[in-house]
């Protein structure tokens, strides 16, 4: 049954812009009953999970990485103190009332002290040398991840109450070995006694559960929590608040005046974006919403009046068009050549097994009589290990990897006549050679494999030819009318 409420997820960058978040999203001019029938699932403040685990892009170690590496030294304790200071500084910049600031800091101190005590015990156990704590490190990562969301959700609920809102802090992070419920059960219990018509729940994006959120979903865990809450409570709409619009291309590459807000698309397009690492939503989270016919809206936190982009299961553009041009700047083309492959089964399965074993993300693949090529979003060092494994099994095969860039044009229906010639012409005019190309029958995406140095230029050329120039006749028509 569809409810009256929305379930809304707020990303870390949006969380960090606290004043704007309250002005544009959490309150946004609402009063009385209009403040409610909304559920907010919050990420940690920008940069906080990096301090707790490791930096998502640079790999700079946080508490977890220092704990794994220090082997009894004090590096992780210093990193934990950095977290405490960062959380206190964040609170200091948000709270006007001293009582609320003291309450927020006391909560942070209590949670950090509890996790620190656990790590101290584990460090002492590890120091004996007779104990293997490798399995416990998975739990450590889960505990640390939950700290960030516990801080942001608790502080946001306090701030909302200071503004007269009946906000309720919903803490899904707590769990122990005697409380091994699944995610759905934990959510069901947490919401059992909440009246959404009179209460504004502020929910931790991390949920402690038997599945292990970080283990299963890596940094995408908050979107899984958000999705399951929407599904289990029967939301009328799911909304993600980001620091940008879901646009036709990266504005930094094509220009802010050239990038277009997509406006409408479907879950198929969202899946293609996730496949390229540009997530509108985690594919697992999108699956649950799609299967229960809950539309997803992606909104820009900093554009209060704009409705954002609506993603539905059944949407197809009125006329064929490219909705977005994006890709992967650094990918690897893994090529497996075996002269005796033709007519022999088993090679495909063996390659897939190696890729799965090493955790390589497959973007797409192509094959002919004696060659199978996988385009991977994976580090070169990981691909080298994959090659070594396959070479041991197939010593006569020629196996190689080459760095490439993947540029993809995507839309709910890109079947317009002449799209492929126009795309190739645009790339050729920009001096870009196409190494390979992937075009699926379903007409939702085309991938162009180019040299890594041509990534930016390829995005710009395809966006100009397939998005900007396509819009010009329509714009001319509107001006004439």
Image (spheres, rainbow, N blue to C red):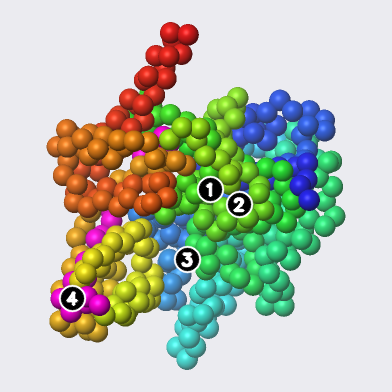
Labels 3 and 1: the sequence-earlier one? 3
**Residue stretch rendered in magenta on the structure:** 321-343
Q: CA distance from mark 2 to mark 1?
A: 7 Å
Q: Which residue appears at 43% of the width and 35% of the height? A: 320
> Which mark's residue is nearer the viewer, 4 or 3?
4
Q: CA distance from mark 3 to mark 1?
A: 35 Å
Asked whether the viewer can see residue 432, the reply is yes
Q: CA distance from mark 4 to mark 3?
A: 43 Å
Specify the label residue 119 is tagged with: none
Labels 4 and 1: the sequence-earlier one? 1
Name the residue beneath numbered marker 3. 64
Labels 2 and 3: the sequence-earlier one? 3
Name the residue beneath numbered marker 1. 267
| 53 vs 238: above or below | below
Asked whether the viewer can see residue 463, the reply is no
Q: Which residue appears at 64% of the width and 72% of the height? A: 210
Residue 241 drawn at (x, y percent): 57, 39
Whether residue 11 sits left or right of residue 227 in the image: it is left
Whether residue 252 sits left or right of residue 479 in the image: it is left
Name the residue beneath numbered marker 4. 338
> Does the CB distance between marks 2 and 1 fall below 8 Å?
yes
Name the residue beneath numbered marker 2. 290
Q: Which residue appears at 25% of the width and 43% of the height? A: 455
């Amino acid at each position: 049954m569809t409810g009256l409420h929305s379930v809304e997820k707020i990303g870390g960058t949006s969380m960090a812009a606290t004043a704007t978040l309250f002005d544009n999203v959490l309150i946004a001019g609402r009063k009385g009953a209009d403040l409610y029938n909304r559920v907010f699932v919050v990420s940690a403040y920008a940069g906080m999970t990096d301090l707790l685990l490791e930096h998502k892009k640079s790999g700079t170690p946080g508490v977890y990485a220092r704990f794994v590496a220090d082997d009894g030294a004090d590096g992780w304790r210093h990193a934990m103190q950095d977290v405490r200071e960062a959380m206190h500084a964040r609170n200091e910049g948000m709270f006007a009332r001293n009582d609320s600031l003291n309450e927020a800091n006391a909560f942070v101190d209590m949670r950090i002290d509890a996790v620190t005590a656990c790590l101290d015990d584990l460090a002492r156990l590890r120091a004996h040398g007779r104990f293997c704590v490798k399995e416990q490190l998975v739990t450590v990562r889960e505990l640390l991840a939950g700290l960030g969301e516990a801080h942001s959700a608790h502080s946001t609920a306090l701030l909302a109450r200071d503004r007269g809102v009946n906000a309720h802090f919903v803490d899904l992070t707590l769990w122990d070995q005697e409380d091994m419920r699944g995610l759905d059960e934990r959510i069901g219990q947490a919401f059992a006694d909440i009246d959404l018509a009179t209460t504004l729940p502020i929910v931790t994006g991390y949920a402690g559960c038997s599945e292990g959120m970080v283990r299963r979903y890596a940094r995408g865990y908050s979107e899984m929590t958000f999705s399951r809450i929407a599904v289990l409570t029967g939301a009328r709409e799911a909304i993600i608040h980001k620091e940008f619009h879901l646009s036709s291309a990266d504005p930094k590459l094509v220009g802010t005046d050239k990038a277009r807000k997509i406006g409408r698309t479907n879950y198929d397009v969202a899946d293609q974006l996730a496949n390229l690492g540009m997530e509108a939503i985690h594919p697992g989270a999108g699956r649950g919403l799609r299967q229960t016919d809950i539309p997803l809206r992606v909104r820009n936190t900093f554009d209060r009046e704009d409705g954002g982009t609506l993603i539905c299961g059944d949407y197809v553009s009125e006329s064929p068009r490219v909705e977005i041009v994006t890709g992967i700047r650094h990918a690897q083309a893994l090529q497996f050549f075996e002269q005796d492959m033709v007519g022999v089964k088993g090679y495909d399965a063996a390659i897939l097994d190696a890729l799965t074993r090493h955790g390589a993300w497959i973007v797409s693949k192509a094959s002919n009589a004696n060659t199978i090529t996988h385009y991977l979003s994976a580090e070169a060092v990981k691909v080298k290990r994959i090659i070594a494994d396959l070479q041991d099994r197939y010593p006569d095969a020629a196996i190689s990897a080459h760095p490439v860039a993947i540029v993809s044009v995507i839309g709910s229906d890109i079947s317009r006549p002449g799209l492929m010639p126009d795309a190739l012409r645009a790339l050729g005019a920009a001096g870009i050679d196409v190494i390979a190309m992937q075009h699926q029958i379903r007409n939702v995406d085309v991938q162009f494999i180019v040299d890594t140095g041509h990534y930016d230029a390829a995005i710009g050329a395809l966006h100009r030819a397939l998005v900007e120039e396509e819009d010009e006749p329509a714009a001319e028509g509107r001006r004439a009318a």
